[in-house]
Amino acid sequence: MNNFKKIGLSALAGSMALTSAQAFEAGVKVESQAVYSTAQGNEPGASEASNGKGIGVDTDIHFTGSGELDMGWTVSVSHVLDTAEAVTNSSTQMAVGMGSLGTFQFNQDGGASSNSIDDVLPFAYEEPWDPGMGTNEGNIFGAAVNKGSVSYKTPAFELPAGVTVSLTADYDPQANVAAPTPGAVGTDGASGEAFTIKLAHESGLTLGGGNMKVGNTAARVGESAATGYAKYSNGGLTVGYQEFYYNAPSEGADTDGDGMAIAYTAGDVTISYSVMNETTNAHGATAALEEEEISAFQAAYTMGGMTLAASLYESDNIEGVAGQKYEETELSVSFAF
């Protein structure tokens, strides 16, 4: 007990020294959202049609800190508490910026570089695929290496003709498994890796893609995923297109599809329309399931720290079942301070 107190006091003294000598900064940000939803049709995974409505409230608390080391490197930390999840499902990241050498980041339940291109399409409100998603599509890319991982990001290298290129790499020693607590080890044994590339032109055109793979274990066969995208922005207009492929032998299926979206912002108002088509192929089946189509229209209005948003989702052939439909409408008010 006494040793613990001494360690704590030493750490506190060290942090105070860093604060005064290295200009350490800390901050807290709170985001809160209330959503009114109505649904009609066959929700993914449900055995019968649902016609319901409800109100949900969620609050995220973001803790951040940053400082500069003697050699000029920077260190930043962040921790997010989500009141809709258990505390153990919160997200923590620690990043070490090395200037022209790039950045290393350690991730606990979120923050992997590859997960940032899970969906790069422009939306007025939020990623619209979740309300109408089947079993394989919750994250198009990067989720398997997003639990307890380390990421490396290069700086943006300048190429001729106004082009910049940047690369990322993720490694997760326990892919697809909840991240172990510090000092503990996992038991699954399957590691995962992911790599991404991004090319950006000064005209507003961005091209990118990524590849992810998880190794085999005695319990399951590894999975793989790939994605590629193009996005163009000019003034308040942004359009995007993305293709994806996900192979999960342990789930007995692979999924491929594409999505496109267009968004326009005028002052404090943003509107968007998006559509995604995907097909799931059951391994060993003679034919693929029906193509599932998910579309969404969204609008948002921002006034300082408050945002009002509305979304209409429509899904056809949910989980590849012909004729199975689902619709969901959301009205949201959120605050950030």
Image: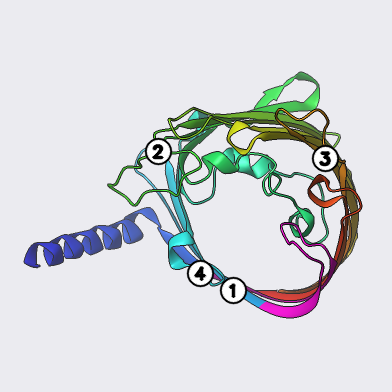
Q: Return the x and y of residue 252 as percentages of the image width and height.
A: 65, 35
Query: Residue at label 4?
Result: 28
Q: Which mark is residue 59?
A: 1
12 up-or-down from 103: above or below: below
- Determine the image quadrant of residue 66: bottom left
Query: Residue at label 3?
Result: 278
Between the C-alphas of marks 4 and 3, the distance is 40 Å
What's the residue type where badge 1 is placed? Thr
What's the residue type where badge 3 is placed? Glu
- Disc 1 versus disc 3: nearer the observer: 3
Q: Earlier in the sequence, mark 1 or mark 3?
A: 1
Residue name at image x 34 percent, y 52 percent: 181
Locate the C terminus by quadrant. Answer: bottom right
Disc 1 residue crowd, few under 14, some 14–19, many 20+, Cα 10 Å: some
Magenta region: 28-56
Between the C-alphas of marks 2 and 1, the distance is 33 Å
Between the C-alphas of marks 2 and 3, the distance is 30 Å
Q: Earlier in the sequence, mark 2 or mark 3?
A: 2
- Determine the image quadrant of residue 106: top left
Between the C-alphas of marks 1 and 3, the distance is 32 Å
Q: Which secondary structure is most common in the magenta stretch?
A: strand
Q: Which mark is residue 188?
A: 2
Residue name at image x 45 percent, y 32 percent: 191
Q: Return the x and y of residue 144 as percentages of the image width and height.
A: 55, 40
What's the residue type where badge 4 is placed? Val
Q: Earlier in the sequence, mark 2 or mark 1?
A: 1
What's the residue type where badge 2 is placed? Asp
Residue name at image x 78 percent, y 62 percent: 43
Between the C-alphas of marks 4 and 2, the distance is 36 Å
